[in-house]
Image (spheres, rainbow, N blue to C red):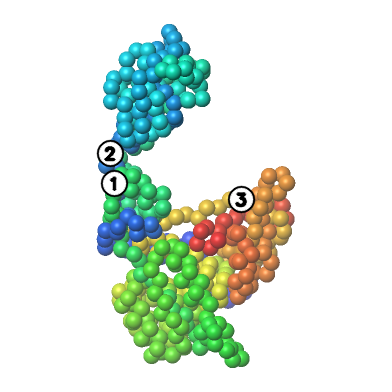
Amino acid sequence: MSSQGAHNQVALQPIEQAMQRLLSSIEPVTEMLNVRLEHAVGSVLAEDVLSTMDVPPFDNSAMDGYAVKFEDLNTSDNLELVGTSFAGAPFEQHLEHGQCVRIMTGAVMPEGADTVVMQENTAANGDTITITVKPRLGQSVRRCGEELTKGQVVLEKGRQLTSVDVGIMASLGFAKACSIRPLRVAVISTGDELKPLGTELAPGDIYDSNRYAIIALLKKLGVEAIDMGCVPDDREQLMAAFIDADSRADAVITSGGVSVGDADYTKEVLEEIGQIDFWKLAIKPGKPFAFGRLPSSYFFGLPGNPVSSMVTLHQLVVPALQKLRNTPVKEPVTYHAKAKKQFFKRPGRTDYQRAVFSTNEKGELVAEPTGSQGSSMLTSMNKANCYAVLPQNSGSVEIGEPVVIQPFDYLIS
């Protein structure tokens, strides 16, 4: 390797180091608001949710059947039916020896009863109930507090509420969720060659697509995306756009204008109004990347090639936004698979190749590339269901050799 090549190799920043620098630079949003529960899905909890009660709040039946004293079944299979316990209308007398109560699922266990016999394991003859299959002591009884106890932490601060979480909070009587206010992220495309959708393309023009993909992913993440449109390579227009975006958002994301040779205006403007680092990352696709601070927001500059833009957004910006919105930064899930076809690679950069994983006839996890890995080919992601993550200093992976895969999460798939 030439001295010049060695210098370029050293200049590339490993993605692990870039991630550490990103996360250590970000201070989470702390502003809180109360959100009505029916609108709370996707909100981020600003404080722990504690159970307001024992759940279940009383011993109740898990089955339709008969509530009995278990010890009675040691002497007789026949019991006297003395009443019924419905959900919302309990049997209010004490159960005496030799008696049973018809009970419905969810109904309060009568005082004195400790076991429920399933209806299928009984035979009725008037007010005499015969037990045909003897239960275990306590069978089919849901005990008070067996799911939750009063004061127990049910949902932790920083959790993004799911539909199930909303149901749990409703079951505990919460009408509102104390949440971190929604994150606002402004998205800007840059470049003279980018044209609006629905217009005719002149020679050399392309449609502005990155902005739509970025906004779509941000919406899935649960943040408020502010579409700032496309800005040409003009210093004054870039300055106005960045100042406007900074005044409206917690973070600003741009695509394009961060590669060597085409970043002059972007770099000049950003250094004038903020503190910006331009990095060369040791990843493929997505080597050029910018991160820093504007007066009121964080700045993320993504490459212009569509796949590079999506990979850097997914691998670097999403974890940064997770920290910014006060949620746990999620480590990507990875598995080891066998290469079904060769993954071609040169040492020097961590490679996020688009791949398809499946299970072979032996039950083994296998993976193969989707084909051409060009950073302009967004269809390579459309055809994939995972990244094959090839380490920075590794070479090609041959057929049958192990390869690390990172299945696409809900943000991509």
Whole-percent x and y of residue 184? 36, 70
Q: Is residue 315 above or below residue 246?
A: above
What type is the residue that disc 2 sits on? Met
* Left or right, residue 371 beside residue 332: right
Query: For numbered disc 3, what is the local secondary structure?
Result: strand
Query: For numbered disc 1, what is the local secondary structure?
Result: loop
* Left or right, residue 43 beside residue 346: left
Disc 1 to disc 3: CB gap under 8 Å: no
For marks 1 and 2, the one nearer the N-term is 2
Where is mark 3, residue-wise? 336
Q: Residue at x 60, y 59 (%)?
A: 385
Whole-percent x and y of residue 6? 57, 71
Disc 3 to disc 2: CB gap under 8 Å: no
* Left or right, residue 256 beside residue 299: right
Quadrant of the rendering where the C terminus is positioned = bottom right
Residue 240: name its quadrant: bottom left
Using the image, tell me which numbered label, if any, was put on residue 53. Answer: 2
Residue 369: name its quadrant: bottom right
Using the image, tell me which numbered label, if any, was put on residue 173. Answer: 1
CA distance for labels 1 and 2: 9 Å
Camera-side mark, 3 or 2: 2
For marks 3 and 2, the one nearer the N-term is 2
Camera-side mark, 1 or 3: 1
Disc 1 to disc 2: CB gap under 8 Å: yes
- For the question of whether residue 374 can be seen, the reply is yes
